Amino acid sequence: MRVVKKKLLRIFTSEDESFEGKPFYKYLLERAKERGLEGATVFRAIAGYGKTKEIRKHKLFQLRSSLPVVVEIIDEEEKIKRFLEEIKGKHNGLITLEDVEVIYL
């Protein structure tokens, strides 16, 4: 077993946020892959709220969805910092960065 210190970047967005004509979460996922970052995952929430304090949740007959989405990206600190510089100004929502230990079995 090997344990390595990495950084975990979390970007909080929503299903309806877009950039360059595509969902923002998809833009982030594609950019992370293109930049060779170690891993990225997109999570779709059941419900949540942010700056506006408006609770967003799925409604049965709603045509457009605005559910919260979280993109998690993990890699070495320098790669994460370069990625953050690249997306600067493209998103005004919450972004967190934390230390993690990755366990390779």
Image (cartoon, grey):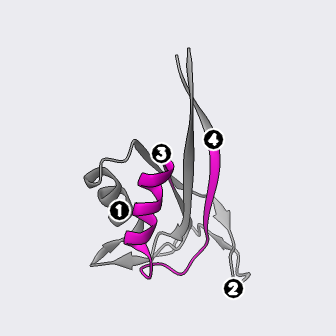
Marked residue nearer the N-terminal end (4 or 3): 3
**Type of amino acid at the residue the image marks with label 1:** Lys
Secondary structure of the residue carrying tag 1 is: helix
Marks 4 and 2, how far apart at CA: 30 Å
Q: Is residue 78 magenta?
A: yes
Label for residue 26?
A: 1
Chain-order first, disc 3 or disc 1: 1
Q: Quadrant of the N terminus?
A: top right
Q: Helix or strand or loop: what does disc 4 sit on?
A: strand
Residue labelled with disc 3: 76
Q: Nearer the viewer, mark 4 or mark 2?
A: 4
**Picture coordinates of residue 99, whole percent (x, y):** 64, 46
The part of the chain drawn in magenta is 72-99
Mark 3 nearby-residue class (10 Å; few <14, some 14–19, many ≥20)? some
Q: Give above or below for 88 relative to 74.
A: below
Q: Amino acid at mark 3?
A: Glu
Q: Earlier in the sequence, mark 1 or mark 2?
A: 1
